[in-house]
Image (cartoon, helix red, strand yellow):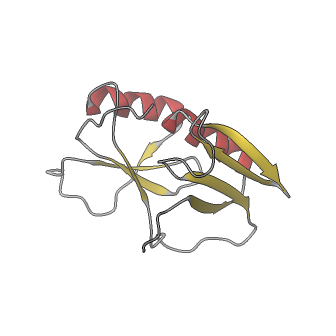
Amino acid sequence: MSCRISELVLNCNDPELLAKFWSAVLGYVELDRDEGAIEIGPPDRGFGGLQPTIILSPSNNPRTGRLPLHIDVNPVDRDQAAELERLLALGARPADVGQTGDEHWHVLQDPEGNEFCLLHRQLPFLD
């Protein structure tokens, strides 16, 4: 027997802002709201599908330093360069975590400064 990831919870200052950002990045939709938290996930799949949902949970606790966990994303319908342009237009910002410049990925930050990586390999779209 084993487990699988069903939800990722991200504590944040502005769940509305991050729900909008991550929904646009991932093609997710709002699934639920509960006590200020917003759950987003794949359209027509919701909780329990192949991809985990994300819960953006309001928190007033200031974050110090880098998060011990970050999200990696891959383009599904365009190359990495075009996807990088799209993510930057959505509000992502480049992040410097000590890269050499020879990496095949881009380190970015979401609108609240949470780091994530845009990887090079294009993956198939899950429908």
* Furthest residue in direction right, as rendered: 35
Where 71 falls versus 66 (above or below)? Answer: above
Q: Is residue 118 left or right of residue 70?
A: left
Image quadrant where residue 93 sits: top left
From the viewer's side, name the closer residue of 101 and 26: 26
* Furthest residue in direction left, as rendered: 102
Where 33 falls versus 84 (above or below)? Answer: below
Q: How many marks?
A: 0
Which residue is rendered at x = 27% and y = 33% of the image?
Answer: 80
Where 44 falls versus 96 (above or below)? Answer: above
**Percent of width and height locating residue 25:** 50, 36
Where 92 falls versus 96 (above or below)? Answer: above
Which residue is rendered at x = 57% and y = 47% of the image?
Answer: 111
Image quadrant where residue 61 sits: bottom right
Which residue is rendered at x = 24% and y = 58% of the image?
Answer: 99
**Percent of width and height locating residue 15:** 72, 50
Image quadrant where residue 83 sits: top left
Quarter occupied by the N terminus:
bottom left
**Percent of width and height locating residue 39:** 69, 49
**Percent of width and height locating residue 53:** 58, 51
Q: Is residue 58 left or right of residue 71?
A: right
Which residue is rendered at x = 47% and y = 48% of the image?
Answer: 50
Quarter occupied by the C terminus:
top left
